[in-house]
Image: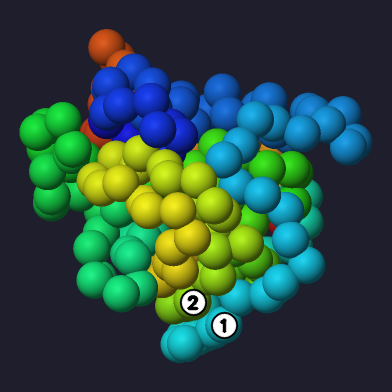
Amino acid sequence: MRTSIIAAAQGPSEDTLIVDRRRLLASAASAAAGALLASACPASAASIEVLEDVKGVGSRGARPGDLLLFHYVGRLEGSGQVFDSTRGGLKYRDGGPGVLRPAAVALGGGPIPGICEGLQQALTGMSIGGRRTVRVPPELGFGGAAVGAPYAIVPAGSTLVYEVELLRLSATGPDQLTRGIAKCGAGGAGQQDENCGAISLAEFL
């Protein structure tokens, strides 16, 4: 039930909460400039607050246009409730077991369902192997609408806390980013998580 996609208040159906990571990357990488993908995440001029930042081992930080493979855990600030995670080990809202499977994004490629602007800001500048914890204000999270996330409902106006780890960075396309882990990421009836727990750090520049 992953690649960590949040469907806005439409229930916990597994099919609606999953997007094939490879298809998402390919479409994001080829999108025309200025085109926007549907998203529950509003744009804003606000900024995140970095609570912890552990430097990675990569040769440079992530920048707009890069394709990134990463783990994250998203929590509601007040209660600490996990609403979304790529690390598995919990129960989804529909009762199914959470799956260990990293997420992917074309950084700066426009809004992406489930990857709010605050999370993209958190990834910006990170190098592979880096870890970052950030506080995301509502205007960079999911704004004034309640959102049905994989593990919990995100109430309207929620401040979010994300813990992020960057695994791979590619400036040369999705084939390199997913090298050796082709069976980690298919969703729906073809859900696979083979090799998801043993992804080596890599950058392709």
Which image quarter is the C terminus in?
A: bottom right
Q: Residue at x 75, y 44 (%)?
A: 109
Scheme of colours in the image: rainbow
Q: Residues within 10 Å of mark 1 (few under 14, many from 20)?
A: some
Quadrant of the rendered structure where residue 82 is? bottom left
Compare marks 1 and 2 and give the one earlier in the sequence.
1
Q: Residue at x 35, y 39 (%)?
A: 148
Does 120 sit above or below residue 96? below
Q: Looking at the image, which is closer to me, 169 or 106?
A: 106
Mark number displayed over residue 92: none
To which residue does mark 1 refer? 49
Residue 203 at x, y percent in the picture: 59, 58
Q: Looking at the image, which is closer to me, 41 or 22?
A: 41
Q: Is residue 113 left or right of residue 13?
A: right
To which residue does mark 2 refer? 134
Q: Is residue 2 left or right of residue 27?
A: left
Quadrant of the rendered structure where residue 165 is? bottom left
Q: Is residue 30 left or right of residue 165?
A: right
Q: How many numbered circles does the render carry?
A: 2
Under circle 2, the secondary element is strand
The amino acid type found where label 2 is placed reads Val
Residue 96 at x, y percent in the picture: 11, 32
Residue 52 at x, y percent in the picture: 45, 87
Residue 20 at x, y percent in the picture: 46, 25
Under circle 1, the secondary element is strand
Does 127 sit above or below residue 104? below
- Circles 1 and 2 in contact, beta carbons < 8 Å: yes
The amino acid type found where label 1 is placed reads Glu
Which image quarter is the N terminus in?
A: top left
Q: Residue at x 24, y 71 (%)?
A: 79
